[in-house]
């Protein structure tokens, strides 16, 4: 229980488990996704873009190799880079401003 945290949305009461009140945080990482009190996906999207960029940099030598066919490069990108970028996308609430990015 010492490392357990909780986010409370639309309530002022804390979360109690037995006699212990959980620490209230403004954001946390759950199953690899960043969640915040306002359910604003902007931070998560920025994090995903950065993680996809990092994944690309790690794979740059392979993806930019002239020894691979275009088809194989596209398949590797789809499986590796896009997966990192789009993980959890079904839970995002997308606004016009986010879609323009």
Image: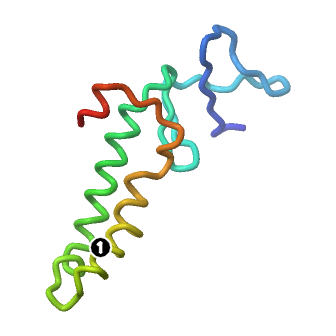
Q: How crowded is mark 1: few (under 14 residues within 10 Å), some or many (20 or more)?
A: some
Left or right of 59 in this view: 1:
right
Q: In this view, does 61 lie to the left or right of 77?
A: left
User: Residue 1 location in percent, x, y?
Assistant: 72, 38
Q: Which residue corresponds to the image point at 67% horizontal and 37% vertical from the top-left? A: 2
Q: Does residue 87 appear left or right of residue 74 in this picture?
A: right
Q: Residue at x 52, y 42 (%)?
A: 90
Residue lying at the far front in this picture: please name it: 71
Residue nearest the viewer, comparing 91 with 4? 91
Q: Residue 26, image x and y in percent?
A: 49, 24
Q: Position of residue 68 (x, y in %)?
A: 23, 87
Q: Which residue is drawn at 85% across and 26% down?
A: 18
Q: Residue furthest bottom?
A: 67
* Colour scheme: rainbow
* Mark 1 secondary-structure assignment: helix
Q: Which residue lies furthest to the top in this view?
A: 12
Q: In which quarter of the image is residue 11?
A: top right
In the rendered view, would you say 6 is above or below 45? above
Q: Determine which quarter of the picture holds residue 56.
A: bottom left
**Above or below, comparing residue 92 to residue 37 in the picture:** below
User: Total label count?
Assistant: 1
Residue at horizontal 83 percent and vertical 23 percent from the top: 19
Residue pointed to by mark 1: 74
Q: Which of 97 and 39 is in front in this view?
A: 97
In the rendered image, the vertical position of residue 7 relative to residue 84, given as above or below: above
Residue 12 x %, y %: 64, 8
Question: Can you tell which quarter of the image residue 101 is in?
Answer: top left
């Amino acid at each position: 229980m010492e490392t357990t945290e909780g986010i409370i949305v639309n309530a002022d009461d804390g979360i109690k488990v037995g006699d212990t009140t959980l620490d209230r945080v403004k954001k946390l990482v759950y199953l690899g996704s960043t969640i915040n009190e306002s359910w604003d996906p902007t931070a998560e999207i920025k994090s995903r873009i950065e993680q996809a960029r990092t994944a690309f940099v790690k794979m740059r030598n392979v993806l930019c190799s002239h020894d691979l066919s275009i088809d194989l490069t596209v398949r590797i990108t789809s499986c590796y880079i896009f997966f990192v970028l789009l993980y959890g996308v079904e839970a995002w609430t997308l606004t016009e401003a986010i879609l323009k990015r």
